[in-house]
Amino acid sequence: MTVTNAELDPLDPETQALMDEGDRLARHLAQTLDATLHDQPRLIFLGRSLALNLVRAFLPTVEHVSGRAGAPLHAVLDLDERRRAVVQTVTADGELKAVLPVDDLLRDLLFVRGVLNPVVRGHLQDGVLGDEHHATRALVACLKSRPVLDAMGRQIQVWLGKKSLRR
């Protein structure tokens, strides 16, 4: 019997929950982007990478921006009662400030009125094409794109109580 790396080093529950969110995102991308069944592994790569990287960048960004704004929040990744990933913010005195499901966060960062932001769509469509290196460059361009960074800023402003959640 052969033992795989996954059996030797299982993912922690929060990372597994992020991977699951990435898989859900990949299924949505499969319906949204011009992709074939042959492109499925690339879509899974893009979905999981977006979920992992956006959430892991969002947590320290919330802490940094809220600290600079004079209202420090601690941001953590946790699981809800359905074992789905959620981002929680806690005040310095331990009070739970906000809880946001990761699927809602991804929607807010990547979509506009239920449709992929056109810039995000362009980067992700580009990521479906070409080799793995090309997909990685397209993914990085998506993560650093102005619409994603602006959406992240809007979400943080909501948590700081400075704007409404609806755009």
Image (cartoon, grey):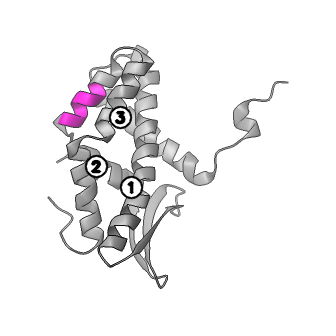
Residue 146 percent coordinates (x, y): 21, 44
User: Does residue 39 show up?
Assistant: yes
Residue 72 percent coordinates (x, y): 39, 76
Q: How many marks?
A: 3
Side of 104 where 166 appears, left or right:
left
Report which residue position mark 1 lands on: 58
Residues rendered magenta in the picture: 119-125
Residue 112 percent coordinates (x, y): 18, 46
Q: Is residue 123 above or below residue 97?
A: above
- Residue 138 lies in what quarter of the image? top left
Q: Are marks 2 and 1 in contact (CB under 8 Å)?
A: yes
Report which residue position mark 2 lands on: 109
Q: Pick whichever of labels 2 and 1 is earlier in the sequence.
A: 1
Q: Residue at x 43, y 23 (%)?
A: 42
Say which element carries label 1: helix
Quarter occupied by the N terminus: top right
Residue 114 percent coordinates (x, y): 21, 45
Circle nearer the viewer, 2 or 1: 1
Report which residue position mark 3 lands on: 140
Q: Pick whichever of labels 3 and 1 is earlier in the sequence.
A: 1
Q: Relative to the observer, which residue lies in front, 84 or 123?
A: 123
Q: Is residue 19 above or below residue 163?
A: above
Question: Pointer 1: residues within 10 angstroms few (<14), some, or many (20+)?
Answer: many
Res. 122 mark: none
Q: Residue at x 20, y 45 (%)?
A: 147
Question: Pointer 2: residues within 10 angstroms few (<14), some, or many (20+)?
Answer: many
**Distance between the alpha carbons at the discs numbered 2 and 3:** 15 Å
Q: Is residue 92 above or below residue 25?
A: below
Callout 3 amino acid? Val
